[in-house]
Image (cartoon, grey):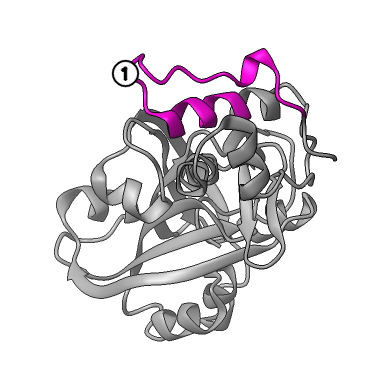
Amino acid sequence: MADLPVTEEDAINRAGGVALWRQIADILRGEILAGQWPEGAALPTESALAERFGVNRHTVRRAVATLATEGLVRSDQGRGTFVLEARLSYPIGRRTRFSEIVSRQAREPGGRLIGSRIEPADVRIAGFLELPQGTALIRLETLSVADRIPISTSWNWFPADRFPNLVAAYAETGSITEALRAEGANNYLRRWTRIHARAAEPEERDRLDLPAGASVLITDALNEDETGTPLHFTSTRFAADRIEILIDSERDEPEESGSL
């Protein structure tokens, strides 16, 4: 798409108390949401946008970076800045997999291990996993992305004696599904999922690259094996403006929440 000519709507208020980069971000966001820049379209160059708005390139760069943190655009070094696809549709049912959900929507999934440790089960987690309090658990902290955009960060607990090599398997594959498969758990089902929303906390904003004031959708979920024995409790924070959750009671495909 060609660079747009300057219009009255491009005028920014230099004395109104609102930062210039924020005003530019607001204008570009409105154009993207209105469909003026379709999915996959390249935005004009920094130089062109700087000329359009009568500002320096640093101001434009900050405005575009804001749109990137909101999941609206992606900047590829040497290629330009491109409008991202619509929100990721995330179905939750008895059987779902993050990697399959992302791949079905023509986006590239990925997973990264943030940290791991062995810890005793507190009363809450022990209750979910139906284990005695104090049982040794593997705790995994992970980040899941689509097209390199952070989608969710998760805290995951597994019985340590059942999955002794889980951390190494996840570090190698970036996938909880594959890690569990390597440990002999070839299939599992969702017993329940609870969902609520709140403002993102600083650690969550940092992991998900979210601006101040952003919200997260939180899913707490329990997965069980085919015998009905709990094997995985997960608490996941989704970037609320990057996904939409679909409660799908009829889907019969592999399932997972938040992590790969």
Tell me where residue 127 appears, x and y as whole percent: 26, 49
Q: Is residue 181 above or below residue 90?
A: below
Residue density around tag 1, few if under 14, some if 14–19, many if 20 or more, within 10 Å? few
Q: Quadrant of residue 182?
A: bottom right
The number of numbered discs placed on residues in the rendered structure image is: 1
Give the residue at x 54% y 40%: 67
Q: Which residues are magenta?
A: 5-28
Residue 124 appearing in the image = yes
Q: Nearer the viewer, residue 25 or 91?
A: 25
- Provide the secondary structure element on which disc 1 rests: loop
The residue where tag 1 is placed is: 17
Tell me where residue 80 appears, x and y as whole percent: 69, 57
Give the residue at x 56% y 79%: 173
Give the residue at x 62% y 21%: 10
Is 65 situated left or right of 125 in this image? right
Does 189 lie within the magenta span?
no
Residue type indicated by callout 1: Gly
Q: Is residue 160 above or below residue 123?
A: below
Is 125 situated left or right of 38 in this image? left
Q: Nearer the viewer, residue 119 or 59?
A: 59
Where does the C terminus fall, quadrant-wise?
bottom right
Tell me where residue 172 appears, x and y as whole percent: 52, 84
Q: Is residue 166 above or below residue 24?
A: below
Q: Nearer the viewer, residue 56 or 83?
A: 56
Residue 92 appearing in the image = no
Give the residue at x 25% y 75%: 117
Does 17 lie within the magenta span?
yes
Where does the N terminus fall, quadrant-wise?
top right
Tell me where residue 236 appears, x and y as whole percent: 41, 48
